[in-house]
């Protein structure tokens, strides 16, 4: 994975440190505290871009800035996970233009100023959580990122590091006014917008799944083609592709026929 020479702040390149835990590996509380101290130090010197956990397989990722690989390796000398037994440790150059980051690459406000580091989740209220999980996973292709059966908490998203949708089912035991207020948020225009590589194909897939399409594919004057649809509880979602992407696909499809002529 190769990063641009000018990626990141001050012309620095971006590097990704990946740690994947073997099934029998165990991170102790002492090692977790050491990891927290290590990432705070990386942040303090202005290198940190993003840090978080990997879910499947379990692990840990760190995205940071460095002038070159040698500097990146020096920055990781104090990484406590580097010395941990039962892990696979990798250092890769990171290309946000090819793979994205899931976090902001812009220079952040000063540390400790209450800066925002990640848009974590957006709630969607549903009447049947199990049915909703199946729909968002099987119809839209989202993945369950986190789930706690004891508290009925679940997050779905497009992959680790991306913003998640949290599916919430109102429960009467919450009491009033929380139960009624939450229930009133079901079946609304959520404001959630997805980007797709083919909005026509998505519309066809939604129709095959008997999903409700509220507004068919429309060409917008700003170059996007949009599709408005809803989940089984009437929560409205928008998806779009861009006209240049659609044109490129059409040109590629027409190219073999043109060669035959």
Image (cartoon, rainbow, N blue to C red):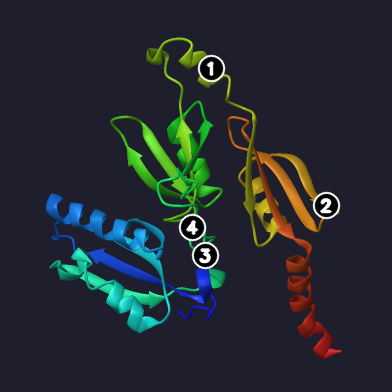
The kind of secondary structure element at disc 4 is loop
Q: Quadrant of the C terminus?
A: bottom right
Count neighbours of disc 3 (C-alpha within 10 A) and say few if under 14, some if 14 to 19, many if 20 or more: few
Q: Give whichever of discs 1 and 3 has the lower sequence position.
A: 3
Q: Quadrant of the N terminus?
A: bottom left
Q: Which residue is mark 3?
A: 100
Q: 67 left or right of 28?
A: right
The residue nearer to you, when weighing 23 against 47, is: 47
Q: Give whichever of discs 4 and 2 has the lower sequence position.
A: 4
Mark 3–mark 4 CB contact (< 8 Å): yes
Q: Which residue is mark 1?
A: 181
The residue drawn where x is 47% and y is 81% is 2
The kind of secondary structure element at disc 3 is loop
The kind of secondary structure element at disc 1 is helix
Q: Give whichever of discs 1 and 2 has the lower sequence position.
A: 1
Residue 102 circle label? 4
Choose mark 4 or mark 2, whichever is in front. Answer: 4
Count neighbours of disc 4 (C-alpha within 10 A) and say few if under 14, some if 14 to 19, many if 20 or more: some
The residue drawn where x is 52% and y is 76% is 11
Q: Which residue is mark 2?
A: 220
Choose mark 3 or mark 2, whichever is in front. Answer: 3
């Amino acid at each position: 994975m190769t990063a641009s020479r000018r990626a990141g702040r001050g012309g620095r390149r971006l590097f990704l440190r990946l740690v994947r835990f073997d099934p029998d590996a165990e991170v102790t509380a002492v090692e977790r505290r050491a990891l927290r101290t290590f990432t705070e130090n990386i942040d303090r010197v202005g290198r940190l871009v993003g840090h978080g956990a990997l879910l499947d397989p379990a692990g840990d990722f760190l995205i940071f800035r460095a002038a070159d690989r040698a500097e990146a390796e020096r920055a990781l000398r104090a990484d406590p996970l580097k010395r941990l037994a039962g892990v696979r440790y990798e250092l890769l150059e990171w290309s946000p233009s090819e793979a994205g980051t899931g976090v902001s690459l812009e220079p952040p406000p000063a540390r400790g100023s209450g800066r925002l580091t990640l848009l974590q989740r957006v709630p969607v209220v549903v009447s049947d959580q199990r049915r909703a999980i199946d729909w968002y996973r099987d119809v839209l292709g989202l993945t369950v990122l986190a789930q706690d059966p004891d508290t009925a908490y679940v997050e779905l998203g497009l992959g680790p590091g991306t913003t998640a949708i949290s599916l919430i089912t109102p429960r009467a035991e919450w009491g009033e006014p929380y139960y009624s207020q939450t229930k009133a948020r079901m079946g609304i225009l959520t404001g959630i917008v997805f980007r797709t590589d083919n909005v026509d194909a998505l519309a066809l897939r939604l129709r095959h799944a008997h999903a409700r399409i509220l507004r068919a594919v429309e060409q917008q004057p700003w170059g996007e083609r949009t599709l408005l649809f809803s989940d089984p509880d009437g929560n409205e979602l928008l998806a779009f592709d861009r006209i240049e992407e659609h044109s490129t696909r059409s040109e590629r499809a027409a190219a073999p026929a043109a060669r035959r002529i």
